[in-house]
Image: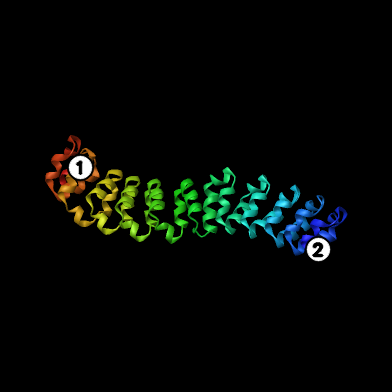
Amino acid sequence: SGEALEHAAGVLRADCEVAAAAVMQSGDALRHAGEELKEDPSLVAAAISQHPLALQHAGMGPRGDKEVVMEAVQHSAAAFEYVLPELQRDPDVALAAISQSAAALHCLPVELRHNPTFLIEAVKKNQGRDRDLVIAAVMQDSSAIEFASTDLRNDHWMMHVAVSRDGGLLRYAGGHLRHDRETVLSAVRQNGRALEFAGEELKRDPVVGLAAIGQDNSAVEFLHEELRQDSGFWAEVIEQSGGRSRAVLFEAVGLSGDALRLASEELRRDRAVVLA
């Protein structure tokens, strides 16, 4: 049996045939094989096929052999801990481990934990289900939220982080978050045009509209018609812009000529604005 190798004489522990028979019954028996045999890739591979964590008992050679370690981490992400550092930095090996279990994220070398391209690929492999993995990716590149699961795109904190970095990512938010005032405000303050993806009731919200136009005048096209017809709202918008925004004045003067009194001296002399 595999356990018998522990008690076998040294000469038998160094016997390839005896060791092979033992690891085929119990991969963990590799720990009792002779030191030279622990450097044998075929024996280590046989042990791993029975017990992936047998990699921890392998010699330095097999632990640095990409084919051997891939076999181990594809069956147990925990084996990633025993891979030599140079192969832990290999994106193929790291992705294989994360695909098996996102828990491998915590064993990744720093350069991969801070590599947005790698992390987005890892999120895709994981189908965006693991919260810690998606958070790590979003913190490096907020666009990773696109590949998050539906559940995570409904996560208030997760979407808040994403839209605070790139408001346009509101397009990927779960339905109820597009109606969440805090989330939408965070988005339009970063990118006014994110108003396009807000719920209808927030498109008519003066505070949201003011924040969106304050960030990007062109966001006016996404305002609810009810708000676009509100002269009081436009007075606030003009005041916010100091009366210097030509695009804002066009909208406001088109609604009420009285808005021109709030314009800057320069825009009061603008023929097109006056005729709006």
What residue appears at the point 20 percent right and 35 percent down from the top-left corner? 266
Say which residue label 2 marks: 21
Q: Quadrant of the N terminus?
A: bottom right
Image mark count: 2
Residue nearest the observer in this picture, 113 or 104: 104
Q: In what element is the residue under mark 2? A: helix
**Residue in front for this viewpoint, 227 or 186:** 186
Near mark 2 (Cα within 10 A), the count class, few <14, some 14-19 or many ≥20, is: some
* Residue at mark 1: 238
**Amino acid bearing label 1:** Ile
Q: Is residue 142 left or right of residue 269?
A: right
Q: Is residue 124 left or right of residue 162?
A: right
**Residue at 71 percent of width and 62 percent of height:** 50
Q: Is residue 192 left or right of residue 260?
A: right
Q: Earlier in the sequence, mark 1 or mark 2?
A: 2
Mark 1 surroundings: few (<14), some (14-19) or many (≥20) residues within 10 A = many
Residue 18 at least partly seen: yes
Viewer-nearest residue: 26 or 83: 26
Q: Label 1, label 2: how many angstroms apart (C-alpha)?
A: 84 Å
Which of the 4 quarters of the picture holds residue 53?
bottom right
